[in-house]
Image (cartoon, grey):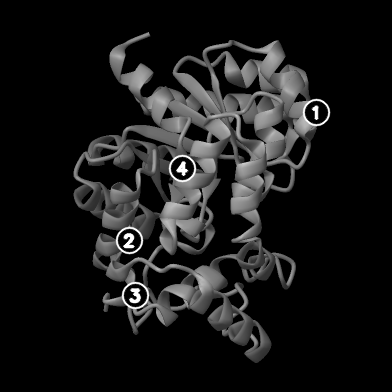
Amino acid sequence: MNQVNTSLRKALCGVSGILVTPFDADDHIAPQHLTPIVDRAVAAGVGTLVSNGNTGEFYCLTTAEAEAMVHATAEIVDGRLPLVAGVGRGIQDALTLAKASRIAGASALMVHQPPDPFVSPRGVVAYVARIAEEGQDLPVILYLRDDEIGPDAIAALCAIPNVIGVKWASASPLRLGNAIQANDPSIVWVGGLAEIWAPAFYAVGARGFTSGLINVWPERSVAINTALENGDFSGANALIRGMSAFEALRAEERNGANVSVVKAALKLLGQDCGPPRVPAAWPLTAEANRRLSALLSEWPVPQSVAQAG
């Protein structure tokens, strides 16, 4: 395996930071507001950054907006970290985004599972294979939210050329452990349910995890990852307890507050990235906003955040 892919595999064992998509007052994308967020993530030691992920409201963006976001984010990151570009939706949109991400200089493609209500396991394999072909030599990371496609389909997905990683976003660590054992040992299996689930996924062989918290407090995410990499599960769990209330807020309203809480926190800290688009829960309820404000007042917020905006 070439040196670039070896380096990317190592980065995936760190924190995969899922960037928000900023909007201005007219609901237009405003990627320039990502600059201080990216700078903090780089300084904190985040492993990779992801444009057009779910915390980035991928399914609320037009294809043209998603293209613009990956180009703008690549310029902001400027090669300081690997940039993973989310691609997906209908196959033609996914192919368009794969090409745009390659041209923008993304380090890898993260393929969202197709949202079509009628999805066959072999259809998912064909879908990812076509995207990987469009990406040419770009490494591919599978974003697996539905493991009900079964072990045979997962094995077929892992066998697609250029697939080097899987972000496992199903709350099924035993199935994850079985998948890790059954497939190419060079594939990096990343915990796709953020900090809360990271210890359970690490226990069965995953490495690294995704995080929306990095938009607000990247140092904590990196500290959790470091503890897990050192086998310090007790330390990692203690660090997770210190941010679990944030994730509990994000899980409210059937996870409809997931992005809303991140954006509300950024606004409270002086780094307004605009509201999330519908159908997200916005604005936060008065009670949720009170709890979020109290939580942020207890965190050792980096000075760069406090002075932003």
**Label 1 residue SS:** helix
Upstream in sequence: badge 2 or badge 3: 2
Percent position of residue 221, x then y: 49, 50
Label 3 CA crowd tier, 10 Å (few <14, some 14–19, many 20+): many
Upstream in sequence: badge 4 or badge 2: 4
Judge left or right: residue 280 versus residue 47.
Answer: right
- As measured in the structure, the alpha-carbon distance from the residue carrying label 4 to the one carrying label 2 is 14 Å
Residue designated by label 4: 16
- As measured in the structure, the alpha-carbon distance from the residue carrying label 1 to the one carrying label 2 is 35 Å
Judge left or right: residue 123 versus residue 98.
Answer: right
The reply to whether discs 3 and 1 touch (Cβ–Cβ < 8 Å) is no
- As measured in the structure, the alpha-carbon distance from the residue carrying label 4 to the one carrying label 1 is 22 Å
Residue designated by label 3: 271
Closest to the observer: 255 or 245?
245
Label 2 CA crowd tier, 10 Å (few <14, some 14–19, many 20+): many
Closest to the observer: 274 or 290?
290
Percent position of residue 249, x then y: 66, 70
Location of the N terminus by quadrant is top left
Circle on res. 174: 1
Percent position of residue 305, x then y: 33, 70
Is 32 located above or below residue 147 in the figure? Answer: below
Residue at figure coordinates x 45%, y 45% from the top left = 222
